[in-house]
Every structure is written in C-alpha cells, then in structure tokens.
Amino acid sequence: MFSLIDEAFETVCQTVGSVTVALNVGVNYVASPEAGARLRAEAREVNSTKRTASYDIKVHDQDGVLIALCQALAYRTGKPLPFL
C-alpha cells in the first residue's frame, strides 16, 4: 500500500520539473482491501511555495471504497530533473 502511495507522491511531485524529495509522509489506513482488489491512488497538490509543497493522496479500491489517506510534504531542491 505504501509503495502505491509513494509512487503517486513521486509522480505528482515531479510535475514541476525539478528534483523534489519527501520531507514527511503520514498515512492513515482506514480499511483493509479484499484479496485481489484493484487499488488506485490519486494525488493532488494542496499548497505550494517556491521550496515546499503539500499533497493529499487517497487510495480507493475498484468499488470506490476508501482504503487509505495520506498527507505528504515535499521539498523542491531547484535542481532540474536529469531526464528532461
């Protein structure tokens, strides 16, 4: 579950075009998914400054049941992404 959240966090952070690293990640697991469930993580930016950004990440199963909630804080280094 955390790997899925981390992937969504990484993806949304890198959209600004600079290297961004996690400062804090807090996850609340609110339900257990059924065996074989398809999970989907959605991340959205809540606030950003030149150097930091905060995100809400939610994980749902294929039926829309909320499985986990995450609040994450990222630090923007200002260094360009090496693959752009």
Image (cartoon, rainbow, N blue to C red):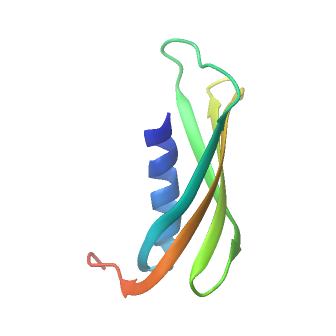
> Residue farthest to the top?
35
What residue lies at 52% left-to-right and 45% top-to-bottom? 5
Task: Give x and y (percent) for residue 32.
Answer: 62, 19
Task: Give x and y (percent) for residue 82.
Answer: 27, 78
- Say if 84 sits above or below 6 in the image: below
Q: Would you say 20 lies left or right of 51 here?
A: left
- Say if 73 sits above or below 32 in the image: below
What residue lies at 65% left-to-right and 66% top-to-bottom? 54
Q: Which corner quadrant of the image does residue 63 belong to?
A: top right
Q: Which corner quadrant of the image does residue 45 belong to?
A: bottom right
- Of 23 and 31, which appears nearest the observer? 23
Task: Give x and y (percent) for residue 81.
Answer: 34, 78
The mark total stands at: 0
Task: Give x and y (percent) for residue 2.
Answer: 49, 39
What residue lies at 48% left-to-right and 15% top-to-bottom? 36
Q: Quarter of the image for the C terminus: give it.
A: bottom left
- Of 47 and 84, which appears nearest the observer? 47
